[in-house]
Image: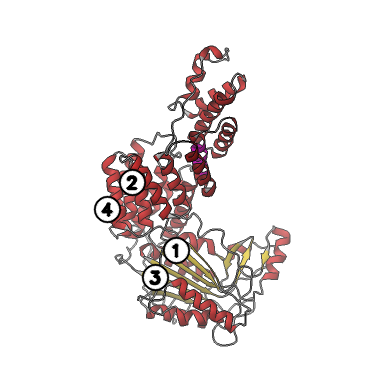
Amino acid sequence: MRRLLVALCLLTVAPGALPAFGQARSQLGPLCTTETTPADQMVDACTKIIALKVFKGEQLATVYFWRAVGWNKKGDYAKVIADTTEAIRLKPSQAVYNLRGSAYFDKGDYDIAIADFDDALKLGPPSGIIFHNRGNAWRGKRDYTKAIADYDMAIKSDPRSAFSFQNRGISKEALGDLDGALADVNQAIRLDPSLPQPLITRTSIWRAKGDFDRAIADGSEAIQLAKEKPPVNIMTPPNSVLISGYTHRALAYEAKGDYARARDDCKATLAIVASDAGSKASQATAKVRLALVTDAAAPIPRDTPSPATQPAASPTPLQTGSAPIPSPAPAVRGARMALIIGNGAYAHVKALPNPPNDARAVAKSLRDIGFSVSEGVDLDRAAMQKMTRDFLREAARAQVAVVYYAGHGVQVDGRNYLIPVDVALKPGANMTEAMIDMDTIMAGLDDQVRTNILIFDACRNNPMAQQVAAAGNTRGIEGASGLAAPTSLGTGATLGAGTLIAFATAPGQVALDGEGANSPFSAALSRHIGTPGLEVQQMLTRVRAEVVSTTKNKQVPWSNSSLLGEVYLAEK
């Protein structure tokens, strides 16, 4: 349970006020206004009472409130919002604003949820429950400092609130305070050992600490508890606890290298019906992770030539049969990994001379400051997809992951795609299947125990734009110059350590390939990325200033960040 319900001074519908209606009139009121009534019966009873048109004002508002409770049990948040809005019109109250705010939270509309919780607090005395729920909304916005402040108020109001301790622990974990997070979650478990949610949070904390066996044990216990005693609180979205439990245990299995069990847990996650935004985000993560572990093989040794660049050699025979998949090397706490790709030798469009040079320069700079680097140059679709998947799979054990791509990129319907060297786009073809979806990369890296830095010098003068636009006439696809600003920092974003995404130029603009051996952006990046003690956003500011000067204001690099603190790629 992530949210709590404020009790309302409830209407007991007087039996004598209800005429016979095909159902005993004495039953309609209790069925509508009893928290334990099954959702369908609650909605049906309240609907029949509303249809009688015998109540007005505050009494009618209460009936709408309880029907909204029924819709909330069913996970139909649009109808929750509609009924609570009508209740607020009739008679505003703390409980109704709290319920509507919680529905907006479950839809992922965190700003509206916060506004509703603010209004709820204005209408009545301070409520620890509403502070808790508003803390959840701040946490949804990744404003963990404000979330912790609200959880502090909730705990002050009720020192035995296990959920406030557990959610404060989640926020502390996101800020990197693993010991503080563990203390809060352990307190939540002491207060109520029957709850699966704190165990799920502790699963994530153990994984962040590199203790995968403890993570798996806690995840398994949480799943067992959720199955034996599904949460009955009306404010817990249907199936949300079980989905979260399977997702976190899958990540722990994957980090340990047990890909078979990770696959099973990802499949279990996707087989459950999700209603709320958090559960859908978990399923988005599970979908990407399932694709990565399904074709998992032995990890590629770091810093070896990529399949597209290594010298020709006798092929290694493929292993067949059902032998267990080799496990990765043991995780190293604080591991820093980078994926570097530079595509320039395009077969069907104008070649770009600089991306391979750019990739090599950036890869060298990252190796020099201790990164383990996977490097690929002039990759076709198969090689690019394999290298990307291998990296995303191995990044499950990294604390910092950097992705750098130089080459052609294109936006189609507002989504960004990276272009392998063998792509031949033709009007009418399903073009996006031949490209690498940037959102998939971002979703594959989205994880609350890792910091991600994604850098794309992929908006150069793009000869594919006309072909993309031409294809749009028959497929409804629009092509545009440059790359689009991401609508979020990752599909299915989790409450994580943060992501920074940087483009060589502003969204919708075209970056220069450069007249020398490197593009203006990558030349500046390779010079500054290894500067000791330079925080990553300050580093990008220096890169931006140099690019603007070099290009005489023709190109202005752009970045967006959800980082929660200072990140240093080169240690002080």
- Amino acid at the residue labelled 3: Met
Cβ atoms at labels 3 and 1 below 8 Å apart:
no
Residue 478 showing in the rendered view: yes
Q: Which numbered dot is residue 214? A: 4
Q: Is residue 102 magenta?
A: yes
Cβ atoms at labels 2 and 4 below 8 Å apart:
no
Residue 196 showing in the rendered view: no
Q: Residue at label 1?
A: 563
Q: Residue at x 36, y 38 (%)?
A: 227
Local packing at callout 4 (Cα closer than 10 Å; few below 14, some 14-19, many 20+) is some
Q: Residue at x 45, y 65 (%)?
A: 389
In this rendering, the label closer to the viewer, 4 or 1: 1
Q: Which residues, given as a range, are shown in magenta?
A: 97-104
Q: Residue at x 37, y 43 (%)?
A: 154
**How far apart in space, not on screen, are marks 4 and 3 (Cα)?**
24 Å
**How far apart in space, not on screen, are marks 4 and 1 (Cα)?**
28 Å
For marks 1 and 2, the one nearer the N-term is: 2
